[in-house]
Image: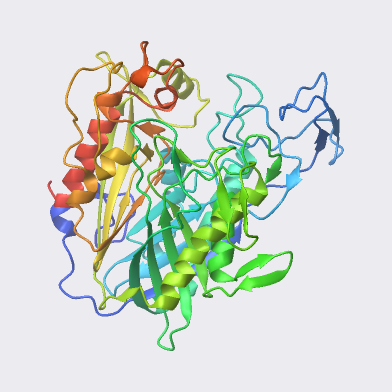
Amino acid sequence: MSILRPPIRSLILFTCLSALSLPAMATSLRVGFAQVPITPDVHDQWTDVNDDAQFDPDVDEWVDGNNNGHFDPVWIAGFQKQRPAQGVKDELMAVAVVIEDGDRRMAIVATDTIGLMRKFVLDVRQSVPEEWQLDYLMLHATHNHEGPDTQGLWGPGLFTSGVDPQYMQALKRNILSAVEVAIANLEPAQMSIARIATDPLAPIVDKRKPTVIDEDIRALLFRRSDNSVIGTLVNFGIHVELAWDRNLLLTADIAGYLRQGISEGIYYDGELRKPGLGGTTLWLTGNIGGLMTSGPSDPVYDAFLKKNITKAGHEKARAFGYSLANSVIEAAERGDFSKTMTPQLAIRADEIELGISNFMLALGTLTGLVDSDPTLHWTPPFVRYRSEVVFIQLGNATITGIPGELYPEIAVGGIENPVGADYLLPPQEVPHLRSQLPGKVNLMINLANDAIGYIIPKSEWDNKAPWVYGDEEETYGEIVSLGPETGPAIHQAVTKIVKGDP
C-alpha cells in the first residue's frame, strides 16, 4: 500500500500504486522555502569536573538556571550517553521546501536532529491542515550528533530516555510552522540540477570494509526569472558529527556551515571570504552506513585558512561544511547546473513491515525507550515494525527516501561476502539501487520519515566472532541495526516503488 492523498487530499489514506503515475502535463513549477529555529533552551549550566564529557551527579557541578530545584539537561544525541549540553554554539534549524507542479504539492522538512521515529512523523502528518493541500510530507533528520536526543537512546542511563516530551511537541509545532511559511512563500521557479565532485582534500572516510563511498554531491537549484536564487537542495552522505564526542555545545555541525556558506557566504571571524548564492539552503543527508565520516585524526584541508585540520571539533566541522559549500558555489558559477524544462512531479510511497531480531532494540521499542509502535507475533520475528520508503520524481531528478542509514554498497555496488560473515551467500541486494534510478541527478536521502538504524547487506552481516576482515573487535553496525533481513527488505521495497510495481 502507498501513502498519498486521494482527490480529497488526505495525507493518511492509502491508495494503490497505479494511481501514482505521472500527471499528463505539468503546467507550472512553484517552490517555497522557509527555516525555523528548533534549538532547545539550555536552562541549567554544568561543569565537567572529571573531564569525561559525561554528567556524573556525584562528581560534576551544576547551576539551577530556572530555580526549580532539579537538573534539567538537554541530552545530546549520538556517541555516548549522559552528555548534556552546556550551551548553544549555533542555531539548530528546521528547513522546509514546498514544491508543486500545478497538479501535485509536496513538502520536505529537514531538522538538525539525530533521527525522527515514524510514530512522530505520522503524528505531524495527521496535524497538517486540509487547506494546505499537501499530497505528501517527508520529514528528514540530518543525523546530527550534536543536537538533542529525539529518539530516546542517549539519556542518563541504559533504560532512561533522553527525550524531552515538551521539546518534541515544540519541534512538531516548528516543523508545521516551517511548512506553513514555505507554502506562503510559493513562487514560480526554474529548476537546475547538478552532480558535483567534492574536494579531494576534504575526503569522506569509510570506517568499515569494504571501502565503498557514494561521494558526489547531488543538488537541485531553484531560481527566479531574474536568475536570483530562491533555494537549493543539497544531498551528500556523511555523518553530521565532526564536532565529535567531547563537544558539549548544541550545533548544526557540517550541515549548518554548508547552509550558511551557500546561502549567506563563507565567513571567517566576520570576514566574507566567498559570496554565497543567496536564498535558503536545505541539507539532505545521503547514504552514510558503513560508516561515512571524518574521524578525529582524519585530515580535512581548510582551503580558506590554508591548513590541514585533524583534531575533531568545530573548526573541522566548519572546514568540511565550507568545503562542500564552496564546491556547490563554484559549480553554479561555472554553469555546471543544467536547466530542466517545467518538471512533472510524481510521488510513490510504500509501507514496509520489518522484523526486529536485535534483542536490545526490540527491548527498547517494547519498553517505550524508543517511541515507536512495534507489534508482537507468535512466529519469528516476534517483534515487528512498520516503516516507509518513498520515491519522488521531479522531471529528470529523483529523490529516494530511505528510513535508516544505508550502507553505500547497496546503493552503488561492491557488496562482499567476507571471511567471518555470519552467512555464506552471494550479495542479496542486487542490482544496486542507483543502477535502477531513472533520473539524471538522483538524490538518496537517509533517515527519511524514520530512523531504523543501519541497513547492512546480508552477506556482510557479522553479529558473532570471528569478525569480518579479521577485525579484533565486535562490528558496530549490527549493534544499531534491526537485523540481517533489513537490507534485503529495504532493497526490495525501493526496487518495487522505483519500477512502480503494485
Where, by quadrant of the figure, is residue 345 drawn? bottom left
The number of numbered badges drawn on the structure is: 0
**Residue 5 percent coordinates (x, y):** 28, 57
Q: Is residue 455 visible?
A: yes
**Residue 227 percent coordinates (x, y):** 43, 85
Q: What colour scheme has been applied to the protein in the rendered image? A: rainbow
Q: Residue furthest top?
A: 465
Residue 27 vertical position relative to residue 150 in the rendered view, above or below: below
Does residue 366 appear left or right of residue 376 in this picture? right
What residue appears at the point 52 percent right and 55 percent down from the top-left corner? 175
Q: Quadrant of the N terminus?
A: top left
Residue nearest the viewer, comparing 214 with 382: 214
Residue 28 vertical position relative to residue 50 in the rendered view, above or below: below
Q: Is residue 177 visible?
A: no
Does residue 170 appear left or right of residue 400 in this picture? right
Does residue 92 appear left or right of residue 325 in this picture? right
Where, by quadrant of the figure, is residue 169 drawn? top right
Residue 411 vertical position relative to residue 6 in the rendered view, above or below: above
What residue appears at the point 50 percent right and 53 percent down from the top-left corner? 201
Residue nearest the viewer, comparing 376 with 425: 425
Does residue 8 appear left or right of residue 202 in this picture? left
Q: Residue furthest bottom?
A: 226
**Residue 298 percent coordinates (x, y):** 55, 40
What residue appears at the point 24 percent right and 33 percent down from the top-left corner? 489
What residue appears at the point 66 percent right and 44 percent down from the top-left corner? 313
Residue 338 vertical position relative to residue 294 in the rendered view, above or below: below
